[in-house]
Image (cartoon, helix red, strand yellow):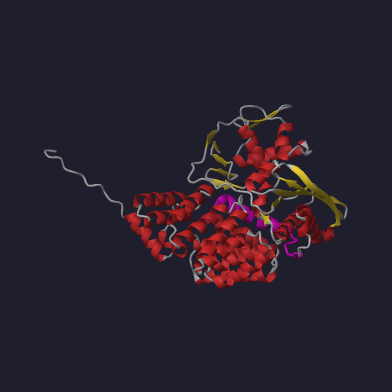
Amino acid sequence: MIYRFGDCVVDRRQRTLRRGGEAVTVEPQVFDLLLVLIENRERVVGRDELIDAVWAGRIVSEATVDSRISAARRAIGDSGSAQAMIRTLPRRGFRFVSMVLGEVPPVVAEEPVLAVPDLPSIAVLPFDNRSADAPLALLGDTLVEDVTALLARVAGFFVISARSAGVYRERAVDLRTVGRELGVRYVVTGSLRAAGDHVRVAVQLTDATSGVQCWSAPFDVARAAMVDLQADVARAVVRALEPELTRAELAVIRRRGSGDLDAWACFRQAVGVLTVGGWNEETIAQTRTHLRCAIERDPGFGLAHAYAGLVVALAQVFGLLPDSDMLRGEIRRMAMTALELDPDNPEVLGYAGCALADLGDYRAAFDVIERALEIDPSNAQAWMVRGVCLTYTERVSDGIADLRRGMRLSPLDRRLGMWGALLAGCLLRVGRLTEARDEARLAQRRDRSLYFAALVEALALHRSGRDDDARTALAQARRMRPRLVLNQMQVYLGAAAVEELAAVEQSAVLVPVKLVAGG
């Protein structure tokens, strides 16, 4: 459902807010609170009901609720005056009073139904930080990512990417719903609580088909030993799921993140801006600014270097930055710097490998990606890059299979639209036109900023002999990106394909006017 009010548009499925046509970055709890008020706008929502819906009944102060209400008001441009959109009713609660128009997004293609694999399938959700301790939250994120990677290395397990599981951060959800949405049988959840120089980590394993808890365990560790905890958690989960797999060798992954919270904040802002704002020049400029901030704060932050290289490479591919030797040199330097700084971080390897693939260096990219998948076989980004490398080096069947595997490993990933556009482009390249068209349409449904997916759709339709429909798809691409210049898409589509699109666009046939006798 999409909700429109004032100059705001809230997309429930994409979890995005736009105001005046501009993307607005909103914290997950604030977005959830806004949805609760919008969807219950016919009545007053009490504080207790709001806490149950947004915080899953956890104890929170009135000041916390009020601060989230204030943040929601700022996000939608509500000044709190007589024309307030969110109204506070003393001792009763809150009500959303602005007129709301709701609409269901048009169905371009059906979302695939995710079947639960026959082998043990599992997702590790973000752990709940129950202390007002930002460094502990970062340690918790690293723990979740590493437990996911370790479980993925166990033969016979199907493990969902940490990025896709991350959409449930700070959301109150039924684990049976999580199981259905991710297509898994088991879900790992946990919490962290600081106690002096120690941390108590509580971990639970739940059967998502029934909602029944299979196992739980507490871990009390010194804060300094948190980096060694992931192997213990992973082994315990394996032992609870499949006793015969306890012999599996689980190597401990050590990664170098950034100890500078400001650097992390800049990095997360960069990711958030690109996620919400979509692919355009303004968003790319903002993203690069945040990444430069992260690198300035911590020059040894490998993940920021890798992501910066990826963003610039993709922006160049999609015609948002010029295709120049200078920029290509910058991309390669950022990727190689990231690999030197953090060679054992699968996320760094995935981003750097993607940047190298976008430069057309498929051999180097493939080597980097193979290393990423050795460390973390659940790294969906790495599977996508591997698929592109194989497709462009004529191993088509294997490449398409890897692309589909990457998307299945992270079915709720916010990059799914982008990945679908990549899959559509590869299918187009090998002449599988109907599949390319369907995947391009689905990519646009998932992310309405993907003008390049509309171009792939137009090419697939043209090559199928459907030029009228191809022109419709081209017109859609121009609506998505009014500044579209076809010649700037040569890196992505190739010069011959750009010429095809230009010819299709210019070939609109004027219907001849018949002269009527005596007229």
Say which quarter of the image contains residue 208. Answer: top right
Write the start and end of the magenta stretch as one range: 251-280
Report the side of 274 relative to 29 (left or right). Answer: left
Picture quadrant of residue 36: top right
Residue plotted at (80% across, 48% down): 215
Coordinates of residue 188 in the picture (x, y in percent): 74, 50
Question: Closest to the observer: 238 or 498?
Answer: 238
Query: Quick one: 155 or 2, which is closer to the camera?
Result: 155
Residue 327 visible in the current orientation: yes
Rendering coords of residue 270 (x, y %): 62, 56
Residue 222: horizontal and vertical position, in percent?
A: 86, 57
As rendered, which of 97 and 448 lies closer to the eye?
A: 448
- Between residue 20 and residue 490, name the one nearer to us: 490
- Residue drawn at x 52%, y 71% as measured from the top left: 326
Farthest right residue in view? 196
Q: Is residue 27 visible?
A: no
Q: Quadrant of the N terminus?
A: top right
Q: Is residue 112 above or below residue 337?
A: above
On screen, residue 409 versus residue 250, left or right, reads left
Residue 83 is a magenta residue: no
Q: Position of residue 49 (x, y in %)?
A: 72, 32
- For the image shown, how many numbered marks are present on the structure? 0
Q: Is residue 349 above or below residue 41?
A: below
In the picture as drawn, the residue positioned furthest to the left comes out as 518
Identify the image quadrant of residue 460: bottom left
Q: Quick one: quadrant of the C terminus? A: top left
